[in-house]
Image: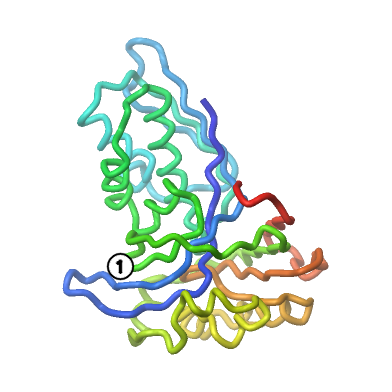
Amino acid sequence: MVVFPNCKLNLGLYVTRKREDGYHDLLTCFYPLNWCDALEVTETKVGAPAFSFVSSGRHIAGGMEDNLIYKCWQIIQADYRLPALSVHLHKNIPMGAGLGGGSSDAAFFLNLLDQKFELNLAVDYKMQIAAKLGSDCPFFLLNKPVQASGRGEIFQPSQVSLHSYFILCIFPEIHSNTGLAFSAIQPRQPINPLAESLQLPIEQWASTLFNDFEEPVFSQHPILRTLKESLYKAGALYASMSGSGSAIYGIFRGEPDLSLTQNYSYHLQKPQKETL
């Protein structure tokens, strides 16, 4: 069985409180983007390793113990008797980009196991597993625009729709340091309520919708500020960094000039139907 995990953008991102457990409370809108990986899971012969994993495409750093797909399999395997599995991930979504590609892979893997082996997993059970794997992992089980709070796992439906726009997302091959970015942020409530900002015309988002991580990350990597400014000069209605970076995206009414992508990795999402 093959699935195609997509990534997400953050429309606004505010760090509102540092929690006693060491994490931070966030406020953001997760929006799905159809920049996708490819994930294949097959059953293997009797006597084969219980879990085998290979990857292609972009290099995946870290060992198996760091792999969210493997962690997800460990949790499910403890509760259900699965046959031996072979997993192949073709990695296309950039890592260290603030796009949530690793979380998406794990969430799609969880849904794939549920469907392929008819586990009939309860939605709450899957959401609990996803939350253990990553703060934005539960979003990919829904894969629809939501306003997220808490660590990023508390959702309210969002009516924001960008289906009639072009979205250009650029990854300049820079991996931002999330821990350093967090350490430079003073938690605060947004001046403009997120839900109200998202209801405004997109042309007004530039003055009302912000990502708290931009200033600390831009100070480390000035090229990101330049890239965001280039998107506005190219006609973007709104441009921002996604997550803690370093992917920068712009929302356009017409098809953008791709020359500004230079030699960077990028994805252009064209106007589409409401769902992926």
Q: Position of residue 249 (x, y in %)?
A: 63, 68
Most foreground residue, 165 or 56: 165
Q: Is 15 placed left or right of 97 in the picture?
A: left
Q: Position of residue 239 (x, y in %)?
A: 64, 75
Q: Amino acid at mark 1?
A: Gly
| Count of numbered marks | 1
Q: Secondary structure at mark 1?
A: loop
Residue 81, image quadrant = top left
* Residue farthest toward the top in the current orientation of the protein: 46
- Residue visible at 74% across and 55% down? 270
Coloring basis for residues: rainbow
User: Which residue is most to the left?
Assistant: 20
On screen, residue 216 above or below 135: below
Can you give x and y, in whole percent of width and height, for residue 229 in the image?
69, 82
Is 253 rendered above or below residue 44?
below
Task: Determine the residue positioned at 46% across, 22% down.
Answer: 42
Q: Position of residue 139 (x, y in %)?
A: 42, 53
Q: Is residue 155 above or below residue 12?
A: above
Residue at (35%, 20%) from the top-left corner? 84
Nearer to me, 122 or 133: 122
Q: Residue at x 43, y 66 (%)?
A: 147
Q: Residues within 10 Å of mark 1 (few under 14, many from 20)?
A: some
Q: Identify the residue under disc 1.
A: 150
Query: In the figure, 271 relative to 214: above or below?
Result: above
